[in-house]
Each structure stands twice: as structure tokens, then as C-alpha cells.
Amino acid sequence: MSADASAGRVHYGIARVDLHLPGITSLKGKRALLNRARAGLTDELGVSVAEVGAQDLWQRAVLGVAVAASSATGVDRVLDRLAAVIERDPRVVVLAIEDLADGLDVDGAVALPPGS
């Protein structure tokens, strides 16, 4: 794809990350650990992160992660690094990662009214 043909294309990826937090003994401890993990992912990889499951369990967490980039390669690089960044903290074990990457063409864009 030429540079002109790829102009305006948005590549995106999402991931579901299942975590085990073996040493955590309270929801307060879990929140503190997840806040550090979220900050690390956001600062280093520029992703958006939300806790999307297992909120009431002390030693389990499910994170939803989203990334957008100008190239499919950029999205793939970020998704491939998720586990490594999270597991820098030895108190966090990544059990599974499911991800999906795709793109949107400029042809599918919604036209904005003049002056927007």
C-alpha cells in the first residue's frame, strides 16, 4: 500500500488479559497493584486500560487493553509486548491474552460538515 493509499487508515487492537495475583490478600492491595500495572502499560506502550472482569476477586483480574496506531505493525508490536510489561512485577502472573487487530479505511469514515 502506498503512502497516499494508507493516509487516514486507522489500525487498532484490543486485548483481554487474564491475571493471577497470588500474594494479594485484599481488594485494596489488588487495586494498588493494578493501578501500577495500568500506569506502566499506559506510560510505556501508550495504551488505554480498564479492569473489565473479576472485580470482586482478590487474586484475579481481567484487563481490557486498547491501542490505535498508523500501521498494523505498530499495533502488533504493542500487543506483543503486553505480557512482558505486566510481568515485570513478580507479583503478577499473566494467565492468558486474547487479542484482535484490525483497521478502518478512510473510505468508511463519516464525513463531517464544513467548519467542523
Image (cartoon, rainbow, N blue to C red):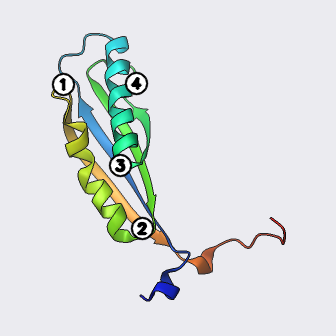
If the image is split into quadrants, where does the C terminus sit? bottom right
Would residue 110 be found to the left or right of residue 51 on screen?
right
Residue type at tag 1: Arg
Q: Position of residue 19 (x, y in %)?
A: 25, 33
- Mark linked to residue 102: 2
Q: Residues within 10 Å of mark 2 (few under 14, many from 20)?
A: few
Mark 3 vs mark 1: give the one in front.
Answer: 3
Whole-angstrom CA distance, mark 2 to mark 4, is: 28 Å
Q: Secondary structure at mark 3?
A: helix
Mark 4 vs mark 1: give the one in front.
Answer: 1
For disc 4, the marked residue is: 55
Whole-angstrom CA distance, mark 4 to mark 1, is: 17 Å
- Sooner in the amino-acid sequence: mark 3 or mark 1: 3
Mark 2 vs mark 3: give the one in front.
Answer: 3
- Mark linked to residue 45: 3
Q: Residues within 10 Å of mark 4 (few under 14, many from 20)?
A: some
Whole-angstrom CA distance, mark 1 to mark 2, is: 32 Å
For disc 1, the marked residue is: 91
Q: Position of residue 3 (x, y in %)?
A: 46, 85
